[in-house]
Amino acid sequence: MNRFKAHLWVVLAIFSLAFAGTAMADENELVALKSQMAQSDKAKAEEVAGLKNQVNDLTKKMSMLETKLSGVEGKVGATPAYVQSGAATVEGPLNGIEVHGFIDTQYNVNFRQPVNAGSATVTNRGRVFDNKDGTFAVNAAEIDIEKAAQEPGQAGFRVDVMFGEDANIVNGTQNDATSDVDLQQAYVEYIAPLNFFEGNSILPSSVNIKAGRFVTLAGMEVIEAPDNWNISRSFMFGLGIPFTHTGVRTNFGLFNDFFDVYLGLNNGWDVASDNNGFKTLETAVGWSPLENVSFFHTLYWGAEAAGSDAGKRILNTNTVTVDVTDKLSVMGELNFARQSDVTGPQINPNWYGFAGYVRYQFTDKFALSSRSEIFVDEDAFRGLTDGSGTISSDRTFGQTFTAEYKLTEQLITRGELRFDKSNDDNIFGRRTNEGLADTTSQTTIGAQVLYVV
C-alpha cells in the first residue's frame, strides 16, 4: 500500500511538473506576444503621427496657394470651367475648326483667236472664268475656314477667301480691274431651337440662321472649280444668275425634313452694299422623292438697278440630279429671268436657258463628262453681245466634253473640248489680224490642274 501511494505521488508529481511547464511556456509566449504588440502599437502611433504632420503641412500649403490664387483671380478673372473640373481636353471657341481649299491653274486656246476691237486682249466671248486665250493662268487659290454649327443652340462661322483672276469676277463690286482678292463668303450662323414645335411632324424643331455674305442658291454650277464636272462654266452661270449675296439666310426642314427650305433677305445680286433702297427676297426648296433623285428650286425677286427701286428682277432656277447607277449620273437645269422697267430700247428684257449634264465614272480615277446647253438673251441685256448696242435675238448653243483623271486624291487633272455657236454673227468676234469676217462660232480647248485640300 505504501508502495502504491509512492507510485501515485510520483505520477501526480510528473503531471504537476508537466502542467507547470506548459503554463510557464504559455506565459513566456504571452509575454513575448505582448512585447511584439507593444512595439507594433508604437510603430503605428509613430506612423499616424507622421501622417498627421504631413496633413498639417499640406493644409498650410493649400492655404497659402488659395491666398495666392485669390489675388490672381482678382486681376484676370475666374478660372475657366474646364480647368476647375479637371478635364484633360481643353475646350473653347477654336475647337472644331476645319480648314479646306484648292488651287486652280488653267491653260486655254481659242482656235479663232478673236481680238476685241481697239484692244490687243484676246478673249473667249461669253465665258466667265476661262475667258483668256493662249495664256497660262492661276484662276483661283482659295482658303476656307469653317466651324459649322451642328446642334440646336450651337453657333459657328465660315470664311472663304479667294485669290487669283477669278476673284475679280466674283467680288462684291466687279468694277476693280486690279483686285485679285475676294471675300467670297463670310458669315456667322446659329441654330435656333424651336422647342414649341418639338415632336411636330410638319413644322421644324430648329432653324439655321446665317448673317453675312454667302454664295447664291441659284443654278447647278458653283464658283469652286473642284465641285463642277467641267472646266468651263455654262453661259447661264456666267451671264444669267448671281454669284453671291449679302444679307440674312434661314434654312429649316418641313414634313420630317422631306422639304429643305430656305428664306432670306439680301442686298441684291453681287453687291457688298445695297445700291438702292429695296431688298431682294430669296426663297428655295429642295426635295428628294427617291433616294437617288433630288430637285432644287430657287426664286429671287427684288430691285437690282443702281439708284432705283422701280425696276424689279425675278429669277427662277430649277435643277434635278439623278444617280442612275454607281457610275452614271445625270443633271438638268432650267432657268428663267426677267427685268422690268428698263429704259431705252431694251424694254422688259428676259433671258432663259437649259443645260443637260452626263458623267460616267469609269474607274476611281478616270471620268468623262458632257454638257449640252442653250442660252437665250433676246435683248442682249446680260452681256452676250458684240458691244455695238444693236439688239438681236441671240440664241447661243454650247457643247462641252471634259475628261478627268486623278493622279492622287488631292491632285486632279482635266482636259476639255468646247464648241459654241450663236445665231448672230457678231457674238464671237473676228480674227482681225487676218481680216476674216465675224463668226457665229468658237471652238476652244482647255487644260486644268487642281489641288484640293
Image: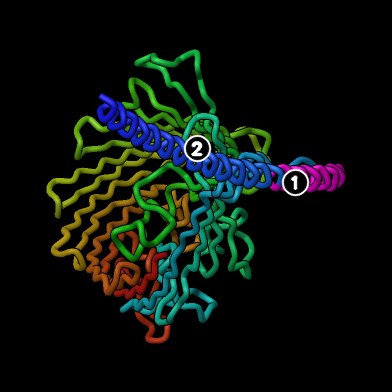
Residue appearing at x 54%, y 77% in the figure: 118
Residue furthest out toward the bottom: 434
Front tag of 1 and 2: 2
Specify which label sits upstream in the sequence, 1 or 2.
2
Is residue 187 something one can see in this rendering?
A: no
Q: Give the residue at mark 2.
A: 27
* Three-letter amino acid code of the residue under disc 2: Glu
Q: Is residue 53 above or below residue 302?
A: below
Magenta span of residues: 50-76
Q: Is residue 129 above or below residue 275?
A: below
Q: Give the residue at mark 1.
A: 53
Residue appearing at x 36%, y 53% in the figure: 394
Query: In the rendered view, does 214 fall on the left or right side of 446?
Result: right
| Residue 83 or residue 329, whichever sits in front | 83
Residue appearing at x 25%, y 27% in the figure: 4
Query: In the rendered view, does 267 fall on the left or right side of 365?
Result: right
Q: Secondary structure at mark 2?
A: helix
As drawn, the label of residue 175 is none
What is the x, y in percent for residue 245?
55, 44
Q: Is residue 103 above or below residue 83?
A: below
What is the x, y in percent for residue 250?
51, 31
**Which secondary structure type mostly characterizes the magenta part of the structure?**
helix
Q: Secondary structure at mark 1?
A: helix
Q: Which color mode does the image show? A: rainbow
Say if the magenta span includes residue 70.
yes
Q: Are marks 1 and 2 in contact (CB under 8 Å)?
A: no
What is the x, y in percent for residue 422?
31, 60
Residue appearing at x 26%, y 40% in the figure: 320
Query: In the rendered view, does 87 fall on the left or right side of 315?
Result: right
Quadrant, the N terminus: top left
Residue furthest out toward the front: 2
